[in-house]
């Protein structure tokens, strides 16, 4: 499987792209570990606790956490060694 196109900056040569892809693929263990860490972080930020509603600004906190989850999910897609068009 090919990697996400986000890994490859524009303007690199094919040789540079091949070297980068090889380096990333050789880091599969590290990427898998990073995926697990990110998944735990997503899970912890996705849970709403009863006490979260005690403050008047709870909606802003929830929106902030939702934004963090969205960003973590975007990063998580990069740790999967699959082709995506984004």
Image (cartoon, grey):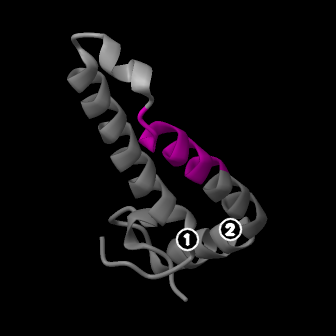
Q: Judge whether residue 38 is colored magenta.
A: yes
Q: Residue 65, image x and y in percent?
A: 36, 33
Q: Viewer-proximal residue, 65 or 2?
A: 65
Q: Is residue 80 above or below residue 37?
A: below
Q: Magenta segment, which residues? A: 37-48
The circle drawn on residue 80 is 1
Q: Residue furthest top?
A: 55
Q: Residue 38, image x and y in percent?
A: 57, 49
What residue is rendered at 75% in x and 71% in y? Answer: 26
Q: Quarter of the image containing the N terminus?
A: bottom right
Q: Judge whether residue 13 is colored magenta.
A: no
Query: Disc 2 or 1, which lies upstream in sequence?
Result: 2
Q: CA distance from mark 2 to mark 1?
A: 14 Å
Q: Viewer-proximal residue, 21 or 44?
A: 44
Q: Quarter of the image containing the C terminus?
A: bottom left
Q: Residue 73, image x and y in percent?
A: 42, 55
Left or right of residue 31: residue 12: left
Q: Is residue 76 above or below residue 68?
A: below
Q: Viewer-proximal residue, 69 or 11?
A: 69
Which quadrant of the structure image shows residue 41? top right
What residue is rendered at 34% in x and 48% in y? Answer: 70
Residue on which disc 2 sits: 23
Which quadrant of the structure image shows residue 27? bottom right
Camera-near label (2 vs 1) is: 1
Q: Residue 81, image x and y in percent?
A: 57, 76
What residue is rendered at 50% in x and 77% in y? Answer: 3
Give the SS element for disc 1: loop
Q: How many residues crowd around disc 2 within 10 Å: few (fewer than 14), some, or many (20 or more)?
A: few
Left or right of residue 37: residue 79: left
Which quadrant of the structure image shows residue 58? top left
The circle drawn on residue 19 is none
């Amino acid at each position: 499987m090919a990697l996400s196109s986000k890994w490859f900056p524009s303007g690199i040569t094919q040789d540079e792209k091949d070297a980068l892809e090889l380096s990333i693929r050789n880091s599969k263990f590290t990427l898998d570990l990073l995926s697990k860490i990110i998944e735990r972080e997503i899970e912890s930020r996705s849970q709403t606790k009863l006490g979260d509603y005690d403050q008047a600004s709870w909606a802003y906190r929830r929106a902030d956490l939702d934004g963090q989850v969205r960003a973590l999910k975007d990063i998580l897609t990069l740790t999967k060694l699959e082709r995506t068009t984004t």
